[in-house]
Amino acid sequence: MVRLGVNVDHVATVREARKGIEPDPIGAAVLVELAGADGIVCHLREDRRHIKDRDLSLLRQIVRTHLNLKMAATDEMIKKAINVLPDMVTLVPERRQEITTEGGLDITTNYDYLEEVTSSLRANNIVVSFFIDPDIYQIKAAAKLGADYVELHTGSYANADDLNQVMDELERIKSMAAAAAKMGLGVSAGHGLNYQNVVDVAKIKQIEELNIGHSIISKAVLVGMDRAVREMIDLMKR
Ligand code: PXP
């Protein structure tokens, strides 16, 4: 069965709206694991807009399943990863102005540096994944430089707005997942997956893991609302 990695960044995004202490992504990670998820994902961004260094080091201590650190391939982040030792590092492109990770990493333009990064992470027993568009040239480059996994960017599929485009994007993900697996790469996928569009992607047999954040955190806010309001009303009655 396909594994689920839950991205807890947006719990920290809500905390940072007040620059306070709640909600804490660490508490969220414990609940995510208790609910049966297979892993916790977090993105330590250069600008620390949501997940902070404190969060990453506490997550490393409490995560019992599998900790997947998403990060940019920079010297600062490589040092951080080797210090914290997550189970997996997913290398993503990062632009300061973007709201979320907008496209896959272009491995071909920075090949030599990424090859070096991959070998130093792997030398520290960290599984290395590349977040890439479902594109054969990127997959070939990932295989050549010794990646363990590729995470196929599902954003174009998730954002497609007519049925033909949805089917085309799904076919692209299917064929690229098959191509990557054939080259010996592990395959995961993520970005923009939600309760409406996940089923067809979860059926793709080469995909071992899906990483989902925004839709799960959004759902949690709504399904938890009834209880949160009732608890406040009960307190006010005392
Ligand atoms: N995988 C990667 C590499 C990502 O950058 C993101 C977005 O932070 C996700 C998965 C999860 O995307 P979403 O929050 O849209 O589910």
Image (cartoon, rainbow, N blue to C red):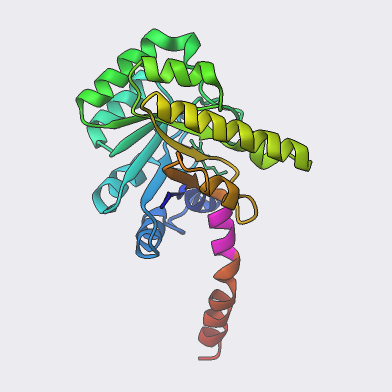
Q: Main secondary structure of the magenta part?
A: helix
Instruction: Where is residue 40? Give x, y as percent.
Output: 38, 49
Query: Which residue of the protein is positioned furthest toward the right in this rendering?
Result: 162
Please tell me whether residue 210 belongs to the stretch shown in magenta: no
Please tell me whether residue 218 belongs to the stretch shown in magenta: yes
Determine the residue positioned at 41% across, 52% down.
1
Range covered by the magenta-colored residues: 215-221
Q: As drawn, is 65 to the left or to the right of 183?
A: left
Q: Eyeballing the image, is 20 above or below 42?
A: below
Q: As drawn, is 229 to the left or to the right of 71?
A: right
Q: As drawn, is 131 to the left or to the right of 113?
A: right
Q: Is residue 59 visible?
A: yes
User: Which of 203 and 4 lies nearest the eye of the viewer?
Assistant: 203
Determine the residue positioned at 20% across, 23% down.
123
Instruction: Where is residue 213? Give x, y as percent.
Output: 52, 49
For residue 162, which quarter of the picture?
top right
Q: Eyeballing the image, is 160 above or below 221?
A: above
Q: Eyeballing the image, is 236 above or below 38?
A: below
Determine the residue positioned at 65% across, 42% down.
158
User: Which of 176 and 142 lies nearest the eye of the viewer?
Assistant: 176
Q: How many marks?
A: 0
Determine the residue positioned at 52% across, 43% down.
204
User: Which of 125 and 143 lies nearest the eye of the viewer?
Assistant: 143
Q: Is residue 101 visible?
A: no
Q: Eyeballing the image, is 115 above or below 6?
A: above
Instruction: Where is residue 135? Give x, y as percent.
Output: 56, 22
Instruction: Where is residue 45? Give x, y as percent.
Output: 46, 33
